[in-house]
Image (cartoon, helix red, strand yellow):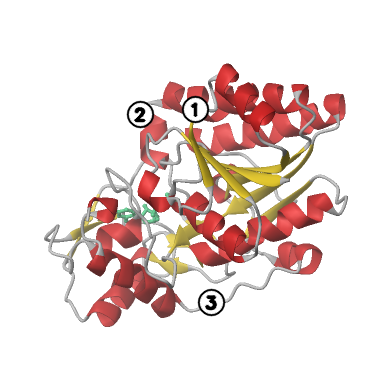
């Protein structure tokens, strides 16, 4: 019996595949390679190039492989793009998940762990954010992820599907072994963009607004190492395999850093001055997002190992400095 990782050639997906293989699991990866990289998938995993919107491809997968449970990362994930091209997000994230669930339901595959996001909360009611807090997204990306959670919930009632939604805060860092890391084209995330400056690929980094109601005016985010996120998926899958009920968990470190603090930490880690310039706010950005992950710790037994921002940025720098062109060399 195997675990199917959809979107397993992407950033968080590939790190989860590595952790699953390390734990001795039989792993099948499907990815359409639109944003993922074939080179990010180790040879021990069976790879299928397939799109979750392709019903025939999903049916073939479930007919060819004996799938115990699904881990679903196959979605678009850029806040800014979701505001300018919302229908792209509805198509891949919602329509894709609908096709996937139809195929799973028809093939009797009833367990799924999937990537949700802190963006489901919108402007938080309180810090740290609890899973029971109101979810009113301020961007289309968060809206589609929240709708995916609801789709799972209704499918569960009708067809007995069981799911865990993992609401990630800001994923960052890279595998300590150095073989895989973060590679987006175009890159939009803060830490890799900052590291492009010492990497010689850009002259400066832009700070999206310094007039937020935070300690230095820049947005506060909770940065969590990708390997810690990957471990949480395995724990969530095992929880479902043990018969655990549908659930939603935040995954973060519980400590918020401003954009300026992240840049300062990267300056210390890399020894580079990293010039920064303040520009306009980015549409859809809440001022602060910091998780309470107590529920994941108590219910799943999750123990994040990388709780220090310098260590997280060092692991990202190790990847970016040795792979300046991502998987292109
Ligand atoms: N950000 C920034 N400059 C950039 C990219 C991001 O100031 O070039 C800010 C962004 O506004 C947010 C934080 O950095 O407050 C993290 O953004 P990212 O896109 O990495 O993750 P998100 O919070 O959107 O998931």
Asked whether disc 2 touches disc 3, contact meaning CB atoms under 8 Å apart, the reply is no
Q: Answer with left or right where residue 85 lies relative to residue 266.
A: right
Q: Is residue 8 above or below residue 195?
A: above
Q: Quadrant of the N terminus?
A: top right
Q: Quadrant of the C terminus?
A: bottom left
Give the residue drawn at x 11%, y 60%: 203
**Sequence order check, earlier mark of 2 and 3:** 2
Label 2 sits on residue: 84
Residue position for label 3: 307
N-terminal of the pair, mark 1 or mark 3, is: 1
Looking at the picture, tell me which residue is in the foreground, 173 or 142: 173
User: Is residue 190 left or right of 54 when viewed as pictured?
Assistant: left
Considering the numbered disc 3 on the image, is that residue within a helix, a strand or a loop?
loop
Identify the secondary structure beneath mark 1.
loop
Observer-side mark, 1 or 2, equals 1
For residue 254, above or below residue 74:
below
Is residue 224 toward the left or the right of residue 300 in the image? Answer: left
Looking at the image, tell me whether mark 1 or mark 2 is earlier in sequence order. Answer: 1
Looking at the image, can residue 169 be seen? no
Residue 270 lies in what quarter of the image? Answer: bottom left
User: Which numbered marker is on residue 51?
Assistant: 1
Per the model, the C-alpha gap separating discs 1 and 2 is 23 Å
- SS of the residue at dot 2? helix
Picture coordinates of residue 112, whole percent (x, y): 71, 41
Q: Position of residue 109 (x, y in %)?
A: 76, 33
Q: Residues within 10 Å of mark 1 (few under 14, many from 20)?
A: many
Of the pair 91 and 28, the residue shown nearer to us: 28
- 3D distance between C-alphas at marks 1 and 3: 35 Å
Which numbered tag is attached to residue 226?
none
Instruction: Give the CA distance from mark 2 to mark 3.
Output: 34 Å
Q: Name which residue lies at 45% across and 46% down.
A: 9
Closer to us: mark 1 or mark 3?
1
């Amino acid at each position: 019996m195997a675990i199917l990782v959809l979107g397993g050639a992407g950033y968080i997906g590939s790190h989860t595949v590595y952790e699953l293989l390390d734990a001795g699991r039989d792993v099948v990866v499907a990815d359409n390679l639109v944003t993922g990289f074939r080179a990010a998938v180790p040879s021990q995993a069976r790879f299928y190039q397939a799109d979750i919107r392709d019903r025939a491809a999903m049916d073939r997968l479930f007919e060819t492989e004996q799938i115990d449970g699904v881990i679903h990362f196959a979605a678009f994930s850029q806040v800014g793009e979701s505001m300018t091209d919302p229908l792209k997000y509805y198509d891949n994230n919602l329509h894709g998940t609908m096709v996937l669930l139809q195929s799973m339901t028809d093939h009797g595959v009833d367990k799924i762990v999937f990537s949700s996001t802190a963006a489901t909360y919108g402007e938080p009611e309180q810090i740290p954010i609890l899973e029971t807090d109101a979810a009113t997204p301020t961007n289309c990306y968060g809206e589609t992820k929240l709708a995916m959670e609801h789709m799972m919930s209704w499918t569960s009632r009708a067809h007995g599907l069981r799911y865990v939604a993992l609401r990630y805060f800001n994923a960052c860092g890279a595998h300590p072994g150095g073989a895989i890391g973060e590679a987006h084209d175009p890159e939009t995330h803060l830490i890799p963009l900052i590291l492009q400056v010492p990497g010689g690929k850009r002259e400066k980094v832009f700070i999206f607004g310094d007039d937020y109601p935070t300690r230095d005016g820049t947005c506060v985010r909770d940065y969590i190492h990708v390997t810690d996120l990957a471990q949480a998926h395995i724990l969530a899958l095992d929880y479902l395999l043990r018969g655990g009920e549908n659930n939603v968990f935040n995954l973060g470190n519980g400590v918020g850093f401003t954009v300026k603090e992240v840049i300062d930490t990267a300056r210390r880690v890399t020894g580079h001055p990293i010039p920064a310039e303040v520009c306009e706010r980015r549409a859809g950005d809440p001022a602060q997002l910091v998780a309470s992950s107590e529920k994941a710790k108590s219910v799943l037994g999750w123990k994040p190992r990388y709780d220090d921002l310098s260590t997280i940025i060092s692991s990202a720098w190790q990847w970016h400095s040795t792979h300046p062109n991502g998987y292109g060399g």
